[in-house]
Image: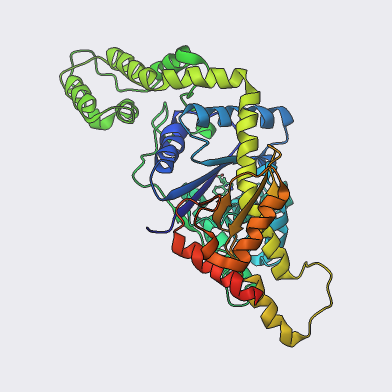
Amino acid sequence: MAKTQRVLTGITTTGTPHLGNYVGAIRPAIAASRQDGVESFFFLADYHALIKCTDPDRIERSRLEIAASWLAAGLDPARVTFYRQSDIPETTELNWLLTCVTAKGQMNRAHAYKASVDANEAAGEEPDAGVTMGLYCYPILMAADILLFNAHRVPVGRDQVQHIEMARDVAQRFNHVFGAGRDLFVLPEAEIEDSVATLPGLDGRKMSKSYDNTVPLFEGGPKALKDAIARIVTDSRLPGEPKDPDNAHLVTIHDAFASDAVKAAFHADLRAGLGWGDAKQRVVDLIEAHVGPMRARYAELMAHPEQIEEVLQAGAAKARAVATPLLTELRQAVGLRRMVAVQQPKAAAAQHAKAALPVFKQYRESDNQFYFKLADAHGALLLQSQGFVEGREAGGWVKRFKTEGAAALDGAPVTLAEGVDRAAVEAALAALVAAQE
Ligand code: TRP
């Protein structure tokens, strides 16, 4: 079986989701997360939101609305690791490690920063007027989000591609400086969904909050949906006059929710003279049929934020189970190590070889049980134990694996991590046994 691909993306928590976000990001991301062989990480980029917004109530409200929207739209938190960036302290720690190997000149070239400088210069202001260090270093924080989970693919809009390239660059530099010949980080790739059309807004331009031309996804109920659709601009052809379905953004919005048969019927009826008023009613009915049941779930979640909180806490625990071992390894790699007799330079190579070994971790969960797991040298999970009442039971198994290797696998209270094959686990255990000798 091919190795599992890690797909990761962040959603900046400013604003309220609209139909364009749903069709362009939420729906395709959830569909992709249901495919086999992918392990998806979706998170609320709330540290990033602080860069753009200093209104605490808006930050709070938007996090809630966005989390509720994704869950209501069908995101399955059992399948996907769904968490808040600000619940993962390893993010800011890695942010600093990366900051120390990122060239300032590269940040000078970041589009978002350059756009601010250009706007300031055009207005006759100081070039850096109103630019915070948060905005300036935005791409480094984003690189930390991605590299912390060793994501292979990062689905983003075109405006974010430069940031992914910067994440690749910084990963490469870090691997080169600190990796001692091995790759500490996977080099991520941007994934631009060309197949998903950008949804036009009321006026035909891209649907976007900044153009004030959006149709709300859930907020405001069916009435807000109907009112927004009533405001979609059409041409002035009267009922009975033939209309061109290829030249009306009302039709583009309709088609984003329609089956092929429904699309064809709608196009044919417009050509045959269907009035715009009736056409809009059909669009309202079609979207409402799709979105209505989700809206009910959304309302329920918004009324019970503690349910969302619980989902996100569980997501953070899942995410940190990946992030913590990687950070341990990175601290080791940069020299933030436990105090021991400092080795002679010659022994340093052997130390590096040791750091490249897989690791067992023992820990305790909120259910009070003891667990252990085995991760490879890059922090990727290989093996997960069941819970034990006694810590020493877990310890006993770890010891057995370290001495007996793969021979201890059969009948052991462990499961292979998703997408990991047994051979990889056997090899990791063999390496550990060899290292004991
Ligand atoms: N900057 C992204 C946006 O505005 C959001 C984001 C933050 C992100 N961190 C990320 C996207 C990491 C992908 C990966 O859309």
Residue lying at 66% horizontally and 71% vertically, measured from the top left: 355
The foreground one among 423 and 212 is 423
Residue lying at 68% horizontally and 59% vertically, measured from the top left: 327
- Residue 125 visible here: no
The foreground one among 309 and 86 is 309
- Residue 185 visible here: yes
State the image coordinates of residue 216 (x, y, percent, origin top left): 49, 23
Residue 414 located left or right of residue 38: right
The C terminus sits in image quarter: bottom right
State the image coordinates of residue 338 (x, y, percent, origin top left): 81, 67
The foreground one among 176 and 16 is 176
Residue 249 located left or right of residue 48: left
State the image coordinates of residue 354 (x, y, percent, origin top left): 66, 74
Residue lying at 52% horizontally and 64% vertically, measured from the top left: 407
The foreground one among 353 and 23 is 353
State the image coordinates of residue 61 (x, y, percent, origin top left): 65, 27
The N terminus sits in image quarter: bottom left
Residue 219 located left or right of residue 373: left
Outermost residue, bottom side: 346
Q: Is residue 140 above or below residue 294?
A: below
Instruction: Count all numbered tags in the image, as a single digit.
Output: 0
Q: In the rendered image, which quarter is residue 246 located in?
A: top left
Residue 113 located left or right of residue 430: right
**Colour setting:** rainbow
